[in-house]
Image: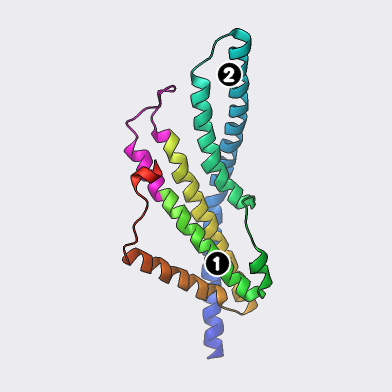
Amino acid sequence: IMSTISSTAANVRAGLQFVESGVETAEAPLRWILKVVSIVALIGIAILINVNVFTRYVLGFTLPWPSGLSVLLNIYITYVGGAIAYYVGDHVSVQYFQKKFPDDVSRGLAVFINALVILLGVAMLWFGTELAWSQRDSETIYLGISLFWSRIPLAVGGFYIVLEAGRRVIETMLEDIEAGTSYSFVSFVLSIAIGTFVYFAGVPFPGGDILE
């Protein structure tokens, strides 16, 4: 029996390591692109603000497009940069109570928390894509481009959050295997059970008006 358990644990570990490697391979280039987009957007906003101030107070007139472009870039920073901030760990988090628990219980809590983050990322991806596609034929006032480009960052940020939170879940489960405990696996199964219950219970999702 012990040999069977050890063999199963080894197979589970190998499978999780394979999936983690695949996720990291897909995540790394996307993370680099999102970082570049966030940096360019931030620099762009700084330049546009100065251009707007210069034309208004020095040249005596106001250009209409810098304001609209600044808003668009700010949207990219909010959702794309926010997703990168999750990877870096810059979001506000309260870990006081989690750290008070033993390591095995703390890992279980970490998996449950990241499962909730995955749910948030899926919602961003799903509704962001839906919103972007539904408004693809509408245009911004000053830039004259499709509203699709101002809505799709929500979906892109959600997609990256799903990848990163999923990688963290796998990483924590691997740590649990190494420690010889199973709290993270129980937490993962519980998260799936809760998500399944919510889905089949017909809990309504936010409507289009809330998204807009």
**Mark 2 vs mark 1, CA separation in Å:** 47 Å
Label 2 secondary element: helix
Residue where numbered disc 1 is placed: 111
- Residue type marked 2: Asn
Within the image, what quadrant is residue 45 found in? top right
- Viewer-side residue, 69 vs 87: 69
Instruction: Please report the bounds of the magenta region as a residue range.
Output: 126-149
Q: Is residue 138 magenta?
A: yes
- Viewer-side residue, 79 vs 35: 79
> Residue 121: image x %, image y %?
47, 53
- Figure check: 81 above or below 177: above
**In this rendering, the label closer to the viewer, 2 or 1:** 2
- Residue type marked 1: Val
> Residue 57: image x %, image y %?
62, 12
State the quadrant of the C terminus: top left
> Residue 186: image x %, image y %?
51, 76
Residue where numbered disc 2 is placed: 52
Please identify the residue farthest to the bottom as the structure is shown: 1
Classed neighbour count for the residue bearing mark 1: other residues with Cα under 10 Å, few (<14), some (14–19), many (≥20)? many
Residue beneath the point at 62% across and 53% down: 92
Q: Is residue 107 visible?
A: yes
